[in-house]
Image (cartoon, rainbow, N blue to C red):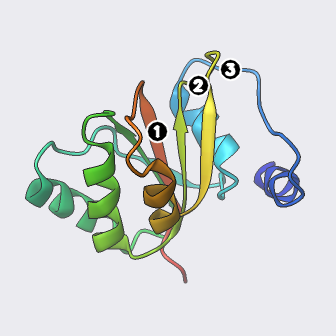
């Protein structure tokens, strides 16, 4: 139920953070501004693009928020594969949670790719993708 409050704060440009818990996945999910009432955690996608696209395709019709971990070395390619499979869904990309340079970028998958651009991704990432629209 708290996602409505987080989303409203985000829309009004109010900084949102939380007290960290035992895992980055819950923190990223809450800070994403996406629905939290039902979600599916899928862990790390496969390393190779074709396998990763098949992995993502298994959840293409899932109505729940999807959560993935991703390595900084594969992040841009993984976002591209997610965009190809899921379309331009709402998403959030969280990194370095509970650390000094903690960050959450929210928007459409294409916007996350653009925001990441040519910068060198560092640290661990959590990718949160909105579920399929009903």
At 41% from the left and 40% from the top, the residue drawn is 119
Q: Do tag 3 and tag 1 residues touch (Cβ < 8 Å)?
A: no
Residue highlighted by disc 1: 126
Number of other residues with Cα within 10 Å of mark 2, as a class: few under 14, some 14 to 19, many 20 or more = many
Q: Which mark is residue 20?
A: 3
Image coordinates for residue 19, horizontal then vertical, percent: 76, 21
Alpha-carbon distance for marks 2 and 3? Answer: 8 Å
Residue highlighted by disc 2: 97
Q: Is residue 98 left or right of residue 82?
A: right
Q: Is residue 39 left or right of residue 21?
A: left
- Mark 1 residue element: strand
Number of other residues with Cα within 10 Å of mark 3, as a class: few under 14, some 14 to 19, many 20 or more = few
- Mark 3 residue element: loop
Sequence-earlier tag: 2 or 3: 3
Q: Do tag 1 and tag 2 residues touch (Cβ < 8 Å)?
A: yes
User: Eyeballing the image, is 58 above or below 69?
Assistant: below
Q: Nearer the viewer, mark 3 or mark 1?
A: 1
Quarter holding the C terminus?
A: bottom right
Sequence-earlier tag: 1 or 2: 2
Q: Residue lying furthest bottom in this view? A: 134
User: Eyeballing the image, is 60 above or below 33?
Assistant: below
- Mark 2 residue element: loop
Q: Is residue 43 left or right of residue 17?
A: left
At 61% from the left and 16% from the top, the residue drawn is 99
Q: Nearer the viewer, mark 2 or mark 3?
A: 2
Sequence-earlier tag: 3 or 1: 3
Q: Do tag 2 and tag 3 residues touch (Cβ < 8 Å)?
A: yes
Number of other residues with Cα within 10 Å of mark 1, as a class: few under 14, some 14 to 19, many 20 or more = many
Q: Nearer the viewer, residue 43 or 32?
A: 32
């Amino acid at each position: 139920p708290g996602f409505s409050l987080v989303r409203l704060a985000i829309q009004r440009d109010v900084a949102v953070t939380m007290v960290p818990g035992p895992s980055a996945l819950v923190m990223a999910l809450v800070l994403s501004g996406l629905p939290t009432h039902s979600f599916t955690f899928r862990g790390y996608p496969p390393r190779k693009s074709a396998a990763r696209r098949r992995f993502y395709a298994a959840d293409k019709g899932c109505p729940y928020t999807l959560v993935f971990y991703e390595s900084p070395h594969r992040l841009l390619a993984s976002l591209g594969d997610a965009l190809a499979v899921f379309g331009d869904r709402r998403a959030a990309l969280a990194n370095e949670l509970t650390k000094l340079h903690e960050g959450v970028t929210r928007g459409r998958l294409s916007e996350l790719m653009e925001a990441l651009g040519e910068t060198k991704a560092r640290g661990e990432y959590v990718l949160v993708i909105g579920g399929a629209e009903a």
